[in-house]
Image (cartoon, rainbow, N blue to C red):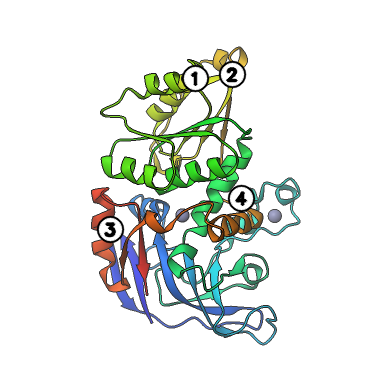
Amino acid sequence: MKAIVYYDVGDFRLEDIPVPKIGPKEILVKVKACGICSTDLFRAEYRRAKPGSVLGHEISGEVAEVGSEVKRFNVGDRVAVLHHAPCGACYYCMHGQEPLCEQYRRMNVDPGGFAEYIRVPSELVEKTVIKIPDTMSFEEGTMIEPTACSVRAISKSRIYPGDTVLVIGGGPLGLLNAQVAKAYGATQVIVADHHDFRVELAKKVGVDYAFNANKVNIEEAVKNLTEGRGADLVVVAVASTNAVHQGLRMVRWGGRLCIFGDFRDVPQPNLDIDPKLILRDDITILGSWGCAPYDYYAAFNLIRTGRVKVKDMITHAFPLEHFNEALKVISSRECMRVILKM
Ligand SMILES: [Zn+2]
Ligand SMILES: [Zn+2]
């Protein structure tokens, strides 16, 4: 089968590799679509991925083969596959902190979503494969995983009906956080970004106010929309310490700031924060990474019922063979979600 194999920074190659063999409790999925997520690209750019590996984790497809002991799935089922499954029994799982579970971090599909077929291990077959209805396209199916990460972030951030939410960063995850916040009852959602293309798309998917921070004074705009208080919740959906500091200037007393941008690959990020912000201004700073199976099911239902609109967010689709072209589009920033379509 064909797959995109990672070798080094900027070195992805289309290769022929064997179709994985499945065990009795596993399924083989023919990948129909897979999102290209910035975390995949960061892993490649900072050499956190092993040379010879296949990336890709926002996966939907069709069941091509089922193991002899699998009851829940049949050949031909349309599915979305979450690549991580918690054990459900460790200390972290018992506390609802599934992304900290050892099994969760280890578990993955084989070889990865940038391939024609994947083997889905039994732990995932049991917990994190969802049958998607005919009304949901495979393209939409790829958006369940990133939406699930937003569901987790927004529920951890304790939104109240009527809240004003500011999202800094209008990339795919920024717009998903914004839409999920609306679904959770926020009445004003504001997105700040530096690209007109993204600002316009934000409005298209239902964001109330989207601003280009190069042209608009965001701090003033947020104050004007909140009677001078600042936002109840700020989600920082970019890996920038400047953005965190900016967010702290725009969150109200007693509000929350959620760090969502993936800082793992930022060399020596350092936040200099005045403790009085936390003590006297009562600002809660939290973070959110990954998602649990229940976030995945919630995200599936939000997309299925149109509460989160993902169709317009998928701006480009490429076949596996044109993976490097897809990367060029992503680096231009004139896009939102870019996917592979097989
Ligand atoms: Zn992702
Ligand atoms: Zn666990």
Among the two numbered marks 3 and 4 on one chain, the one whose residue lies closer to the N terminus:
4
Of the numbered discs 2 and 3, the one sitting upstream in the chain is 2
Could you tell me if residue 55 is visible in this image? Answer: no
Residue 289 sits above or below residue 5 on the image:
above
Residue 160 lies in what quarter of the image? top right
The amino acid type, in three-letter code, at marker 3 is Leu
The picture places residue 310, in percent across and down from the top left corner, at: 44, 56
For marks 4 and 2, give the CA distance. 26 Å
| Residue that label 3 marks | 327
Dot 3 beta carbon under 8 Å from ligand 1: no
**In this picture, is 270 found above or below 277?**
below
Callout 1 touching callout 2 (CB < 8 Å): yes
Q: Earlier in the sequence, mark 3 or mark 1?
A: 1
Nearer mark to the viewer, of 3 and 4: 3
Q: Secondary structure at mark 3?
A: helix
* Secondary-structure class at tag 2: helix
Residue linked to disc 2: 278
Tag 4: residue type? Pro
Q: Which residue is mark 1?
A: 273
| Number of the label disc, if any, that sits on residue 99 | 4
At which x and y percent is residue 171? Answer: 38, 45
Marker disc for residue 310: none
Residue 157 found in image quarter: top right
